Image (spheres, coloured by chain):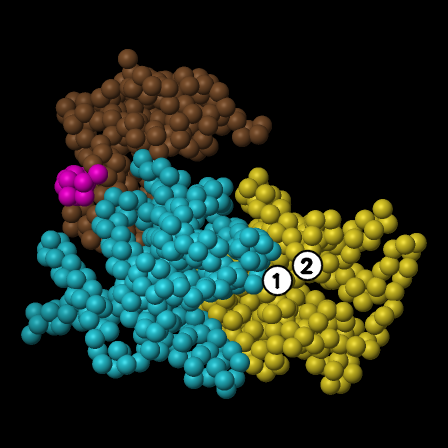
Amino acid sequence: MPLLAVCEISKKFGSLVANDKISFNVEEGNIVGLIGPNGAGKTTLFNCITGIYKPSHGKVIFNGLDITNLPAYKVARLGAVRTFQIVHSLKEMSVFDNVLIGAYLREKNTEKASEIAKQCINLCYLSKMKNTRAGDLAIGLKKRVELARALATGPKLLMLDECMAGLTSTEVNESVSLIKNLKDKGITFLVVEHIMEAIMPIADKVVVLDGGIKIAENHPEVVIQDERVIEAYLGKKYSKKLQIATQGREKDA
Amino acid sequence: MMKGNKKKQDLYWYVLIVLLILIPFIPQVAANSFTQHVLILILLYASMSQAWNIIGGYCGQVSFGHSVFFGIGAYGAGMAVVRFGLPPWPGIILGALLATAVAILISYPCFKLKGHYFAIATFAIVEIFNRLFMVWYWVNGALGLDYPLVEVGWRNFMWYTTKIPYYYGALVLFIIIFGIVRFIEKNRFGYYLRAVREDQETAEATGINSTMVKLSAMALSAFLAAFCGAFFVQYNLRVDPTMVMSLQVSMVFVLVTILGGAGTLFGPLLGAMILIPLQEYTRVLWGGLGRGTDLILFGFLIILIMVRQPKGIMGLVDEYFNYKKMRKVISAESDIKY
Amino acid sequence: MSMFFQVTIDGLLTGMIYALVASGLSLIWGVMDVLNFAHGEYLMVGMYVSYWLGFLMNIDPLISWIASGAFCFILGILTYKLIIRHCLAGPPLSALLATFGLSMMLKNIALNRFSPNFRILTGTFLDGKKIIIGNIVLPMPQLVTSIFALVVVFIIYYIIKRTRLGWAIQATAMDKEAAELMGIKTESIFVLVFGLGGLCVGIAGGLLPSYLAVHPEVGGLFGLIAFVCVAMGGFGSIPGALLAALLIGLVEALGGFYIAPVFKYVVVFGLYLLIVMIRPKGLFGW
């Protein structure tokens, strides 16, 4: 049984169809990439899965439970936690407090929760600035605080919405290795990403959306060569470059 | 390091309580009933503003409707004494429960509103309650309730010749309410309150039921506010709708908190320590000289604070410590150079 | 039945005044997201200006509204320059609380200078004149003031929708930074908007003393009703505020007549809460 099953999700805003009967599964322990051009409906789909929007049609099954109409906080409590594309850090609070809020989800006791928060902060390389006001951080660090907070809730499935956009290449590499580490700890990922070099090498599967429709779902190497994906999103040159890059990485591995 | 801080804070807190207990033994205070009056009001308004601070400061839902809960508490005690000839205690409990129920009923729909819409809705609620109480015959309408002469003592919570017991009554209220907030501040609920204030969407995505958090904060806040109202009427020996249930009264709670620093533990106390003496002493000094001079000054002070330091006195304190820290860093750096 | 019509028309006439007071507030709210708590006190100031001009110099409110409007225009600008400008960077409610302080000052200065007495202007040009249609009596002071108010609301609306200045104001309201990049001096727009807000309410205040008594507390209720109109109408929408104001005037008059005068504001505020529960951002909000 997959950890997350998205079954024929549709979302309409008036006459605009943002998602049209999208289905795919996320298997436990995998990293699944969700890619597509701007306006393809990736964030809308995220919002439907996490209970921020009510889908017009379809079902979302998480860990065997129907979460389609659950409010966002219940989805999070079940263990499907997300970050936002536009960071919403808790500005006036310190980095540590931001993460502590996540840790409180599973642990009421302040001392134990602080312990969890500390671990997550270390995992995300944030220990240096744990007393800084979250609002004062640069964008890359803010995104990492988001990730740390989500991580502290002890999720089964982490859903990252463009957590690498706007980062420097060093930061991207750090994030990629972080995701890999977390995967080894048994966390499943669903990642919306535009930076193909980052997502393609680590993803077990990629789902491609275009205009609200799923146009491909397969292993990254296959998706890169898919005609429709190249036409809709990647472009020929980029596809070639990516193929070389992925092959190179595989040889390295 | 954090542990050490905690112990230090605990120490400050207990020292403060001991000082407050000892204040009436100062001869100047013991002899001057007006000073006692001001001290009682400071403690009362600090407590009431702290009750408001739970929802308005920590949780960021700026309600201008708290005089409704304050008023219900006041009327609870007042009705028990005036209408039913009982000691105030059952009325206080009933009033507090009623205020909590009203708070939950009216704030559940209001929490759908954001920002100014929420503020204006709470204005409207105060006005509705004010006007209803004005014409409600059972609670004596606009005339209000005047306390009869009853036996003095703790049973009736009433004294005529001395103010000292009132002072200790207010101190108990102060310790309970500040104690509760002190406890909340360091625990999960306190963090959740702040998370909801900072960003509701993030809070929800982190598994926080923000509606529930806001409702509980509002309920707790209203419950405590009702006790403050009850104390007020027992001290004042009279209650009418304008006195306890109007926008002006609500505003005082908000202003005291914001002046001191919203969302901070000692903000309400600092705010009350400045505003209440200002209000009371100017009233005595200029009350006869010119109408409203105290309020002109009060208004001016509010503008000044909002323009200069919207985070209140606690903001100034933070600024000061940051400045000192910076100085330290700078001097440390210059040490390295030479 | 004729009583019903009479009450309805009275209500609509009151509503038009509310509309003028509210549109000034709505403009400020819409452009700057600031709730000006002293708005009702501007009205009070405007009324005193008009009253004293009438009382001391025999100038009719039909003329002295110009002076009241100008006075409140300047008052608005001063409020912005001295207070609001410094609050915009702070927490969202600091401007509201600062203007609350201002309202307290203005009210008590009026109390201090002019005493709490109710003052009414007699012997004005329109005083005592009325139009009678069938059973319905239309007192001229109310009628002229209300229609005048409605005209001013339309002029303001026209300026916002149809002139270059109005577009600049709209652009500033939508996105301050983007407007600045387009070469709009948003600071001047803010000053102007605050002035215009004062102007609206000043004109209303200038006309009102022809039939309404002036006293230091007169602004409080008007201010509160203006808040309710604006919130009911929706964020910064002048048509919304107009509709809400007419509705409130109507409900106030009918509620006062058919239920009981003491309940009229309970009905008004109750209606507001009901509407806002159904549409949290007001009738015309989104």
Q: Is residue A76 above or below residue A228?
A: below
Which chain gets the cyan colouring?
B
Question: Is residue B73 in view?
Answer: no
Residues under numbered marks 1 and 2 in contact, where contact means CB atoms less than 8 Å apart: no
C-alpha gap between disc 1 and disc 2: 11 Å
Which circle's residue, 1 or 2, is located before the other in the chain? 2
Residue B330 place in picture, x, y as percent = 16, 70
Q: Say if the magenta span includes residue A114.
A: yes
Chain C: drawing colour: yellow
Residue B111 place in picture, x, y as percent = 46, 44
Quarter placement of the C terminus of chain B:
bottom left
From the image, tell me which residue sits under label 1: C221
User: How many C-alpha atoms fall within 10 Å of the one at disc 1: few (<14), some, or many (≥20)?
Assistant: some
Q: Residue at x 31, y 16 (%)?
A: A64
Label 1: chain? C
From the image, tell me which residue sits under label 2: C18
Question: B105 or A45: nearer the eye?
Answer: B105
Residue A45 place in picture, x, y as percent = 41, 27
Check disc 1 and give the amino acid type: Leu
Quarter placement of the N terminus of chain B:
bottom left
Residue A86 sits in which quadrant? top left
| Same chain? Circles 1 and 2 | yes
Chain A: drawing colour: brown
Check disc 2 and give the amino acid type: Tyr
